[in-house]
Image: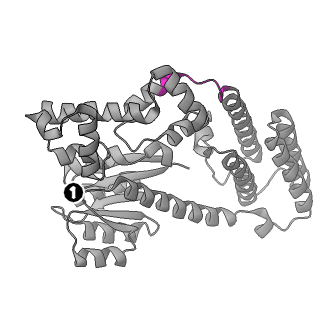
Amino acid sequence: MNYSVIIVDDEPWTREVIKQVVNWEALGLRLAGEASDGVAGFQLFQEINPDILITDMRMPGMDGVALMRTLIRQKANLKIIIISGYNDYGYLREAVKYKAMDYLLKPIDPDELNSLLLKCIQELNEKNIQDRKSYEPDSILEVDWYENYLTQKTFLNGCLMELNMQAAKDILAQIGEMVLRKEGPDIPAGMIMKIYYDLIWMIEQFVVKEGYSMALFMSNMPGKLVFHNNILFSDVMDYLSTLIETVILSLEEHVRNRNRINLDKIQGYVDSHYMENIHLEAVAAHFFVSKEYLSKMFKSYIGVNFSEYITSKRMEKAKEMIAGHGMQIKNVAELLGYVDIAHFYKTFKKYFGMTPGEIRK
């Protein structure tokens, strides 16, 4: 599942740093919007209803405390990460009061921020799992065909594991026929929802065990299923059948292409993301190859290893920012993902033979 994030901070530079250092794709997060003060942030929340809020504390108009207080009343499960340039006990106390995930001081530590976002995702996933459990037939449905249903579901899961699309669709159809035969054509919407969520949960568990995100396949679905009181059981089963087909065909394609990588495409991806906290493992996962295979092919194609290539891109960009645009060295280091400025200086001097200050002169 993709979760949405909004950023509320009156400093454009801080908003830009957050956008650059968050591993959006690797975490499966979506930046849904940004605002420059609490009032605009409140309006943005009303429009988007995000899952995660990253906010400053000291802002004009409505500060972070007032924003948290207002939003938590509307959405108790909202995950909040506070970013502030001030180590203020009063603000920290308010953060604890409104159950913020944590209170981070500027300059932002990319690893710390990404770790907090991962924690947000884990808590949101746990909440979703608890919500889904309320729909599971084994805890709610008391029907004489339930044991048969469980048996068929086990067979269906086995077909998924074998990537046997036709057999999986046939068993799903048998489940549908069995329910219709037992319940008749007027199946209650509540029962339809419970069966749907039970089967969706099984499919998602299979997809996660294969090492993928369900969002990857849902985005390829031709339509979206919307529940209402008059929903037809046949429409739900058709949707599940299409989803199973999409999942299996996509997985087969990934398996076929696992060892065939487009290095031009990979280089383009790295060139677009080198200012982020990018690493070999994340790129390998994005292109569904092993990190060992990617490392070997990347060096063969580019001429240098992955880390050397990233360093060269960052250093050339740093030189451009410092010498060409006159940016402060500490800001350049932060934007390029260097938490330790001493490490940035050392890397820069090793690459160019001069310090950033000497390059500027």
Q: At 87% from the left edge and 57% from the top edge, which residue is drawn?
A: 150
Q: At 18% from the left edge and 39% from the top edge, which residue is drawn?
A: 355
Q: At 61% from the left edge and 40% from the top edge, which residue is drawn?
A: 218
Residue 285, image x and y in percent? 57, 39
Task: Indicate whether residue 265 is drawn in magenta.
Answer: yes
Answer above or below: position of 356 versus 258.
below
**Residue span colored magenta:** 257-266
Q: Residues within 10 Å of mark 1 (few under 14, many from 20)?
A: many
Task: Indicate whether residue 260 is drawn in magenta.
Answer: yes
Report the amino acid beneath label 1: Asp
Residue behind mark 1: 37
Query: In terms of depth relative to the viewer, which is nearer, 299 or 200?
Result: 299
Where residue 117 sits, quadrant-wise, is bottom left
Q: Secondary structure at mark 1?
A: loop
Query: By what rule are the colours in the image chosen?
Result: one colour
Quadrant that contains the C terminus: top left
Visible in this render: residue 28? no
Query: In terms of depth relative to the viewer, which is nearer, 79 or 265?
Result: 265
Q: As drawn, is 240 to the left or to the right of 107?
A: right
Visible in this render: residue 29? yes
Residue 31, image x and y in percent? 39, 46
Q: As drawn, is 184 to the left or to the right of 24?
A: right
Query: In terms of depth relative to the viewer, which is nearer, 66 or 214?
Result: 214
Answer above or below: position of 229 versus 214.
below
Q: Residue furthest left?
A: 361
